[in-house]
Image: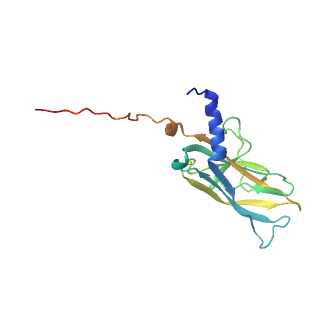
Amino acid sequence: MAIELKDIRTAVRVYLNTKVAVSISPLVADVPGVISPNEGFTFSVTAINAASTEGGIALRNIRYHLSVANSSVAKLVVPPTTVAITRAIPAVPVAGTTDITLTPGTQVKEMFLFPVADRTLTTGDTDTISGLKGRAGALGNTEINFDILADPDLEFLFPKNENSFTTSRPLSVV
């Protein structure tokens, strides 16, 4: 079976799009009822990695990417640093510590959340960031978008010091 190196790159992209489920909870208005102009709302985001029985692999360096399609209708509020380090659009190919850090409490159209604790998503793992906030602007409709960026855990994919098949031979001492 011939494998070209570009197939590995494609496989990682396909994996993230088919084996990792992402979701946004229902939006909860700060003032009960509906979300009105100049009012806040709260929501959570969740990422679920496939179990090993479903072909799951471990992921590391997880970053959460959130954006609002129309920032005149609503914006995202940068969370406190106890929730995540929030950065602007990351440098390609990997966001690092040199990217612009956003100030907690500011309102933005797009942000990347770098969790302060666990930045891995093992097989079958579910991670949720709760208590995220947004703020409505003008009347209208828009969408909040969410996806993750992740790296395959190379130690998981290419384990070291693995045993081969064990063979044996009978031995008789007479």
Instruction: Judge from the rendering whether residue 135 lies leftward or rightward of residue 152; answer left or right.
Output: right
The mark total stands at: 0
Image quarter of the N terminus: top right
Where does residue 82 sit, x and y in percent of width and height? 62, 55
Quick one: which residue is furthest to the bottom in this view? 32
Q: Is residue 164 above or below residue 78?
A: above
- Asked if residue 149 can be seen in this view, the reply is no
Image quarter of the C terminus: top left
Where does residue 44 sit, x and y in percent of width and height? 67, 60
- The structure residue drawn at horizontal position 61% and vertical position 46%, both measured from the top left corner, is 62
Q: Is residue 157 above or below residue 84?
A: above
Instruction: Judge from the rendering whether residue 138 lies leftward or rightward of residue 135; answer left or right.
Output: right
Which is more toward the observer, 140 or 36?
140
Which is more toward the observer, 38 or 9?
9
- The structure residue drawn at horizontal position 19% and vertical position 32%, both measured from the top left corner, is 171
- The structure residue drawn at horizontal position 59% and vertical position 55%, both measured from the top left corner, is 127
Where does residue 11 sit, x and y in percent of width and height? 62, 37
- Asked if residue 132 can be seen in this view, the reply is yes
Q: Quadrant of residue 29?
A: bottom right
Where does residue 133 sit, x and y in percent of width and height? 73, 60
Q: Quadrant of residue 168?
A: top left
Quick one: which residue is furthest to the left in this view? 174
Coloring scheme used: rainbow
Q: Is residue 146 above or below residue 130?
A: above
